[in-house]
């Protein structure tokens, strides 16, 4: 669990490599409440505040609105990056995740797409190295694919 948190912070926002199930779970447990709270605040609380007072207060409300959307977009980007890296862990392209996420916007395909994403999240990882990098769970480094590239002393 500690290793997953270190990896989560170390690969902050990158789309390269692989993410473990624990890393994805921690990311989703952090990002989902943040996004939910910000969206709730944006659409239910801030609409009742400064705009109605007029005058200079609309500037403050506009700045609050811009800051909220900047945070929402940043957290959404990070959530996307961890999901894509989890798909890499099962040797699937990030494009598969994006296609399924877009499928959630189609009314009849919404539940099938969401169920597919959740199933892919819990699938076991591919064994050893795959197309997207070495297994993040292995403690020893992967041997090189081409032993001829090593100096003769290391063979």
Image: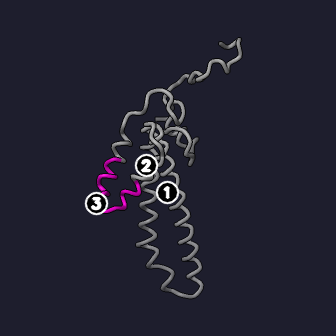
Percent x, y of residue 147:
62, 18
Percent x, y of residue 11:
57, 42
Judging depth in this view, the residue of 35 and 78 nearest the camera is: 78
Q: Range of the magenta residues? A: 101-116
- Magenta span contains residue 150: no
Asked where in the image residue 91 lies, by quadrant, the reply is top left
Q: In the structure shown, which secondary structural element does the residue marked by tag 3 occupy?
A: loop
Q: In the structure shown, which secondary structural element does the residue marked by tag 1 occupy?
A: helix
Q: CA distance from mark 3 to mark 2?
A: 18 Å
114 to 137, vertically: above or below: below
- Magenta span contains residue 110: yes
Taking the spot 40% from the left edge, 54% from the top edge, the residue there is: 101
* Residue ID for mark 3: 108
Q: Are marks 1 and 2 in contact (CB under 8 Å)?
A: no
Taking the spot 43% from the left edge, 37% from the top edge, the residue there is: 90
Q: In the structure shown, which secondary structural element does the residue marked by tag 2 occupy?
A: helix
Percent x, y of residue 73:
52, 61
* Residue ID for mark 1: 76
Q: CA distance from mark 1 to mark 3?
A: 24 Å
* Residue ID for mark 2: 97
Q: Earlier in the sequence, mark 1 or mark 2?
A: 1
Judging depth in this view, the residue of 30 and 134 nearest the camera is: 134
Percent x, y of residue 10:
58, 41
Q: Quadrant of the C terminus?
A: top right
Q: CA distance from mark 1 to mark 2?
A: 14 Å
151 to 26, vertically: above or below: above
Taking the spot 56% from the left edge, 82% from the top edge, the residue there is: 57
Q: Earlier in the sequence, mark 3 or mark 2?
A: 2
């Amino acid at each position: 669990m500690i290793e997953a948190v270190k990896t989560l912070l170390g690969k902050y926002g990158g789309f390269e490599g692989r993410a473990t199930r624990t890393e994805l779970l921690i990311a989703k447990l952090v990002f989902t409440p943040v996004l939910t709270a910000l969206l709730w605040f944006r659409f239910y609380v801030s609409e009742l505040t400064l705009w109605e007072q007029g005058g200079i207060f609309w500037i403050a409300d506009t700045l609050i609105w811009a800051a909220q959307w900047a945070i929402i977009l940043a957290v959404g980007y990070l959530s996307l990056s961890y999901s894509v890296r989890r798909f890499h862990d099962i040797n699937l392209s990030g494009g598969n995740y994006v296609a399924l996420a877009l499928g959630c916007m189609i009314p009849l395909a919404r539940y099938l797409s969401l169920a597919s994403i959740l199933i892919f999240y819990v699938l076991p990882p591919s064994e050893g190295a795959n197309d997207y990098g070495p297994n993040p769970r292995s403690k020893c480094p992967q041997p090189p694919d081409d032993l001829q590239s090593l100096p003769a002393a290391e063979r």
